[in-house]
Amino acid sequence: MSNFLILNNISYKIGNFNLFIDNLEINENEYFIILGKTGSGKTTLLEIIAGLIKANTGKIFLKNQNITNLPPEKRHFSIVYQDYALFPNMKVKENILFSSKYTKIDNKLFEELIDFLKIKDIMERDIQKLSGGEKQRVALARALLYKPKTLLLDEPLNAIDPVFKYEIMDYLKQLIPRFGITVIHVTHNFREALYLADKIGVIDKGTILEYNNKDIIFNSPTYKETAKFLGFKNILPANILGFKDKKIFTINPAKILIEPYSADYKLDCEIMEILNYTDHFKVYLSHKGEKIFTKCTNINLSSCKKSLKIGFSKEDIVFLREKNEKQ
């Protein structure tokens, strides 16, 4: 893969909200997910990429060409919003062929799309009579028929019935190998990100905290802010392990051993609470005032009074930095 889309020093201010993206690089034929909660700036960033919003400062490059001042129609991007933005006064086929007003339609691609998205039987149906999943497939067909260099998706699964959500996710998963395009997809949903993404950028309060391959983001992020956003349970000071050159670490609750025979690190803890579930226990502990959470299946409740020992391996530790901390 090569750098396809590059954003440098992009800033945008509206009211009290400030968006600032110092650097973001997206590769060609990559499924890139911008992951963030509501109000974090996801859709604003997507619309800046599309050219629908003009950034106050910064530059955008597409294949080394400066497209910062290009209008949306000359960027060769297609955008699909969560409300689909279909024309209610047109039937399905008319919606899909809407781009024929501006460009020559590839009939072979048209046939391939309606076959791929399984919408052949609804081509003459009114938009108001479609389900959410059908509307999303029609919106995708319309966007892809334009032959975009990049497909931009704004919370594409947010308004879809959960029964059909994974069906649409399977279509999205096939877009890159089948049509050879780059996809930028914004969502607040962790499961979508895990299933679909090659790479994830975590956005919070208008800033990309970090971006990397999805496995790195979800298992060993660089920053404490990313770990907190992703819901990491154990974010602890490294001095409890004897480190002076490291400030913070995290450890997966499932990697913590109860009363271990051997471990690289062992901590004596006070028991705060033990919750008994069908197939596991949730154990809340305290070590020198620091709260530690673990899940296990092999705890002997009868042997636990007020304290116990935990342990874990050094390879399971992930050291974190503060976002603004100097390296």
Image: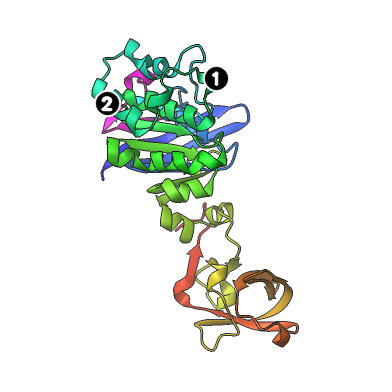
- Residue 166 visible in the picture: yes
Whether residue 255 is in magenta: the answer is: no
Residue 55 located left or right of residue 179: right
Mark 1: which secondary structure? Answer: helix
Compute the Cα span from label 2 to label 1.
26 Å
Is 202 in front, or is 130?
A: 130
Question: For the residue marked with disc 1, what is the amino acid?
Answer: Gln
Is 69 in front, or is 71?
A: 71
Q: In the rendering, which numbered label is found on residue 109?
A: 2
Residue 149 picture location, percent across and down: 30, 30
Residue 289 picture location, percent across and down: 71, 72
Is 199 in front, or is 70?
A: 199
Sequence-wise, the earlier of marks 2 and 1 is 2
Question: For the residue marked with disc 2, what is the amino acid?
Answer: Leu
* Magenta-highlighted residues: 58-76
| Badge 2: residue crowd in 10 Å (few <14, some 14–19, many ≥20) | some
